[in-house]
Amino acid sequence: MATRNSLTSLYLSLSPLICEAAARRHSLSTLAPKSQMERAALVRSLSSSSLACTTRLFSRSPLRLSPPSLSSPALPRRSLLRRHWRLLPPSSPSSSRLLFRRPFSSLSPRAIATPPTHSSDVVGSRDDVAEKHGFEKVSEQFIDECKSKAVLYKHKKTGAEVMSVSNNDENKVFGIVFRTPPKDSTGIPHILEHSVLCGSRKYPLKEPFVELLKGSLNTFLNAFTYPDRTCYPVASTNTKDFYNLVDVYLDAVFFPRCVEDFQTFQQEGWHYELNNPSEDISYKGVVFNEMKGVYSQPDNILGRTAQQALFPDNTYGVDSGGDPKVIPKLTYEEFKEFHRKYYHPSNARIWFYGDDDPNERLRILSEYLDLFDASSASNESRVEPQNLFSEPVRIVEKYPAGEGGDLKKKQMVCLNWLLSDKPLDLETELAIGFLDHLMLGTPASPLRKILLESGLGEAIVGGGVEDELLQPQFSIGLKGVSEDDIQKVEELIMCTLKKLADEGFHPDTVEASMNTIEFSLRENNTGSFPRGLSLMLRSIGKWIYDMDPFEPLKYEKPLMALKARISEEGSKAVFSPLIEKFILNNPHRVTIEMQPDPEKASRDEAAEREMLEKLKASMTEEDLAELARATQELRLKQETPDPPEALRSVPCLSLRDIPKKPIHVPMEVGDINGTKVLQHKLDTHNVLYTEVVFNMSSLKQELLPLVPLFCQSLLEMGTKDLDFVQLNQLIGRKTGGISIYPFTSSIRGREDPCSHIIVRGKAMAGRAEDLFNLVNCILQEVQFTDQRRFRQFVSQSKARMENRLRGSGHGIAAARMDAKLNVAGWISEQMGGVSYLEFLQALEEKVDQDWAGISSSLEEIRKSLLSRKNCLINMTSDGIDLANSEKFVSKFLDLLPSESPVEKTIWNAQLSAGNEAIVIPTQVNYVGKAANIYDTGYQLKGSAYVISKYISNTWLWDRVRVSGGAYGGFCDFDTHSGVFSFLSYRDPNLLKTLDVYDGTGDYLRELEMDDDTLTKAIIGTIGDVDAYQLPDAKGYSSLLRYLLGVTEEERQRRREEILSTSLNDFKEFADAIEAIKDKGVVVAVACPDDVDAANKEWSDFFQVKRAL
């Protein structure tokens, strides 16, 4: 899905799901869909910002949580190809928790768009300018699909290739990509990706990257590592800001300080840590701890095992991210040599996109590229293809599991194929992408449906076609399988594939899939992921292998050709031979069987301890004293601020560049049939986006945990006249997707929470009637009678929650703390936290014992929700299309009951306020502490947004991440509830991190800050507040502000307060922060040994809850 390189999955790159898929592929993501708990975080920062979407991935880019993507018809969820993203604090103090990914979604024009100046008008022809700067033009094409002129240049001296894409998109994108194939699993490309951003020749400070985070208007700022390449992309709508970002990144990759600074390698990669010669030695390092977290997650272990088994003979047979058992074997000399060898212009592909001056791009590049001579790096970095096996392979692997539950039913099995011994031709690639969507793309897709309905497992693993690497793969399997059923799963997969090859697909399925793909391509909605970056990652997927970089950008002709072929020959003639050739008759198959092992985590930890104990025993007293000295020296460097002159080297905008008013989203509030209707007139290219919102306040408290399953049931059960397959096909044929989910938030100044069910849909404006008819059908005609499917929903949800506990423990901890502090938090946790997991575990048995009662409860939820009185409609589209849609809205509302027969209920519940440790089998921790600072009398000011972001990017970044070794540390201020939270991510520490949180107040009181630093902090906050949004997200953000009572006057007031933030505001905020130190509640998702040690050191500090 995500940044796919080929036309087979071109449409996926354009989907708002792009980031999630990317993150899924990196094993650095949370694989679960956005839960209610995560959605609640969407509302944060609305009072001063337009809501920004983002993905659930672990990146160093600002993280903004998106509105949930339209999930039906769902795009295929892809396999677990690893890509490693830099982890960052949230994009603003008020933004959502780090609910990282898909990876790799979005939302308005940026604060500033400096008009481009086209120097080509005065300098002469573009070819002359290119020649002047040392480039030759290789090819020039106009790409109709993205309305862009694309020119491929080659730097004559070094051979560096440059793709310069020009259009009217203000969200400018730059990226530089190096082919970086590793030879072992020491994680060298990943560690280098982290390290080059830690200071450079022109920017000699500890982390220019963080300074850009503090004071840039960037719309994307990140770096990520694939199995065979490393990418450094940036984006901004402000031309001056954009070129600042470009210069910092170019200097970082070509002239990093890390190749001369051993301590950067230690900090980002690995080192021995010894605070005192009498204590134990431990491993520390940001990447080391990041990967310990990755290797604690079963799905990630499965994905890595599969990739390495499919590619035993080339670079994909090792882990570019790094295996924690192997990372400590990496030497500094190897690290430096890898940079010297591969980070060279001769091995680079460079991308520019947007409305800036194409001649200026070449001038900037020439200043760097001209400093180098040609090298052989491009030949040495070439990825060799894997030869196909002559017979299948089987591998059995263990994964760390908890001791609870029936371990015999916790097996995983996945079948994996390498589809070809070389890259596929364009026509075959596109057909395989469509085939993948047909088999797995929606809940009604036959392979997915049959596997889940078999009852042999809880959830799908694998995820279908993966074509981001040189050779494409296909993976599919199940988890939550009984050990007695492993063989049955394998047989079912093979039999189903053979049946599909023999019988083909239903014409309605083919039509629905085609419409889904075509709609996504033409909508071109990449969410908060810049469109130019989506195009770059697609192009680079061919370009990096010395193939045509233009080809992946052009979908129209191959799409039309495939449609014509299906029309002429029939879909069976197109797709059945592909199944037979590439899967059924392909001997290059690897079957992975994953077995739960409750002792594995403790065994791995014991092996690491034993190794370090042997090391210590071999060291002299002098050696130990020197190691302790080196540890202190590294920590001193990490905690010593950069000198002012170094900080001033990083370019920054001034406050004069910042607009004084917030971004305006037009909204008209009207009335149709007694129901309030919000309309946003925006240019959506004839797509109608709508949200149908129902108030949940009449729902009984005990029914709340059923709400997520109620939402899934509406989309995945049938009606009297349509089974759920037919219903899904209809949605796919007539719309761009429909999703349903709960939304809950506190409202500042009110006791009652804001709690709603939101139905989101989109369609071409000409299909508006179909869209509203289908929404009505889903809401009113779906029957809650399919016990078997509901049992599947419960099993799938339980599997997702268990995976979320391991991969997104910070989100679980955040939700748990919120549930202890306010009613809205409690509601969200009931629908997406540990309480929800416990509910699902009990419900699994209850489905068989009391299905009639459950079915009746689902009907009761529907009856409580559906009425015109409880309803609000939100629409975003062009003015004419909005007017034409009103009659369909009227008809839809006429079909709703006028009033709900259920009276409003009072929800008044919170979890007990004690400190809690949620124990899971993991090698890392997620540590949270929070309190409601409004209870201290604090009155919200816009300066809180600046202060919270600054705390994340300085104090917590330096102490929790850089010095403490965690992959992330950050804070979050929910301005609606008043809850201020500290959170860490993949953290080797527990109590030490709590000490850092408790020191925040003193840090603020003692803080000294010059005007430049304060200006950066303000500008960086405005960059988050004015997050880039596409039209659908603007309309959605406006809806949420309306629901939460956030007025334009308040937005303006908060903006003025942000812009006038002073150092005194920081010092005054320290008093509010003290409430967290003195009265805060602590929740940690942690490994058992660390919790036991903590309860011994701080007597019974945690109440212990075992969750897995």
Image: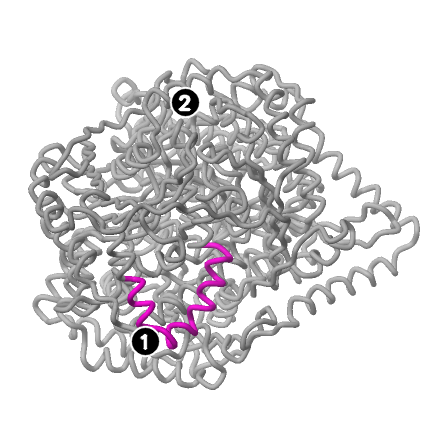
Give the x, y percent position of residue 802.
50, 63
Is residue 259 visible from the viewing direction of this image? Answer: no
- Looking at this view, is 1103 or 421 the one in front? 1103
- The image quadrant of residue 569 is bottom left
Figure quadrant of the N terminus: bottom left
Residue 15 in magenta stretch: no
Residue drawn at 27 percent across, 69 percent down: 439
In the image, what residue type sits under mark 1? Glu
Q: What is the distance, in whole Å, between disc 1 and disc 2 at their CAs?
A: 55 Å
Residues at badges 1 and 2 in contact (C-beta under 8 Å)?
no
- Depicted 227 relative to depicted 970: above or below: below
- Residue sitting at x 38%, y 32%: 46
Label 2 crowd bin: few (<14), some (14–19), many (20+), radius 10 Å? some
Q: Is residue 848 above or below residue 162?
A: below
Residue 154, image x and y in percent?
38, 40
Q: Which mark is residue 931?
A: none
List x then y, in percent, for residue 693.
Answer: 25, 44
> Which region shows up in magenta?
832-858
160 sits left or right of 296 in the view:
left
The residue carrying pointer 1 sits among few (fewer than 14), some (14 to 19) or many (20 or more) residues within 10 Å by Cα, namely some
**Residue at coordinates 40% horizontally, 53% vertically from top-left?**
701
Q: Earlier in the sequence, mark 1 or mark 2?
A: 2
Residue for badge 1: 453
- Judging by the rendered image, the residue that carries numbered circle 2 is 240
The answer to whether residue 846 is magenta is yes
- Callout in the foreground (1, 2): 1
Q: Is residue 696 visible?
A: yes
Q: What residue is drawn where x is 30% and y is 62%?
A: 858
Q: Is residue 567 left or right of residue 112?
A: left
- The reply, left or right, for residue 311 in relation to residue 627 is left
**What type of secondary structure mainly makes up the magenta span?**
helix
Residue 586 image-quadrant placement:
bottom left
